[in-house]
Image: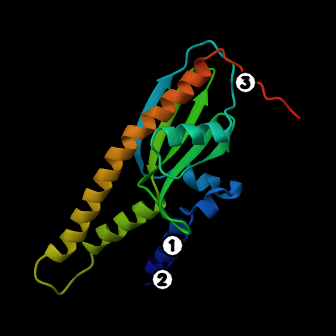
Amino acid sequence: MEILMITVVIGAILAATDNPFFFRYRSLRFLYGFGLPLYFRMFKVLPRSDKFSIPRWKIEHWMAASGFSKPMAEGNDGQYVLMEFVGLPGRPIPLLMRAKISWDNKDRNVIVWGYATWTYFIIFAALLAMFFIPAKMEGDVCLQAPMFVYLLWCGILYFKQSQRLPSIGEQISQYLSSDYQEYRTQR
């Protein structure tokens, strides 16, 4: 019973970190760079540029232009973590995948990983665990229906997000491949 309680508490804490409020905390960023991998794609960078950093606002702009709803990006030189939210203001809901995008000018690659958000992973684990909990009901139909609906919903979200993630990888690859240098005037 103690193990179940500890698992529930850890799951609730991880699910809470899928909130935009916690997403901006640098000390929690390690939670977003791993998880259940659902997507992977690599893009080549042309050997024209020695750019290492991309401003956060530019990545969030590319995300919005690619169709991401309420996009957020956090990171530093060479790596960003991206999340997408839907819902009412004050009640944001993360979508299925968060992405980790990294680039290395030495290897000339932009790599996009898509991981299941903690919320979706925990819901999946809970639904999966229900199959192993003995039930005093006739048949498993009551347990199979929520899992089927959940997997259908995740499939729809995956299809939508897996079409948007390559566009961010392409934008970053093109930006790093260009000779164009940005200059900001300071006032």
Q: CA distance from mark 3 to mark 1?
A: 43 Å
Residue 138, disc: none
How far across and down, in percent of the image, does residue 106 sit? 63, 20
Q: Residue at x 29, y 58 (%)?
A: 153
Q: Residue at x 56, y 29 (%)?
A: 172
Residue 182, disc: 3
Q: Amino acid at mark 1?
A: Ala
Q: Earlier in the sequence, mark 2 or mark 3?
A: 2
How far across and down, in percent of the image, does residue 110 sit? 53, 28
Residue denoted by label 2: 2
Q: Is residue 112 above or below residue 88?
A: above
Q: Nearer the viewer, residue 51 or 55?
A: 55
Residue denoted by label 1: 12
Quadrant in which residue 177 is drawn: top right
The label nearer to you, 2 versus 3, is 3
The label nearer to you, 3 versus 1, is 3
Q: Nearer the viewer, residue 142 or 180?
A: 180
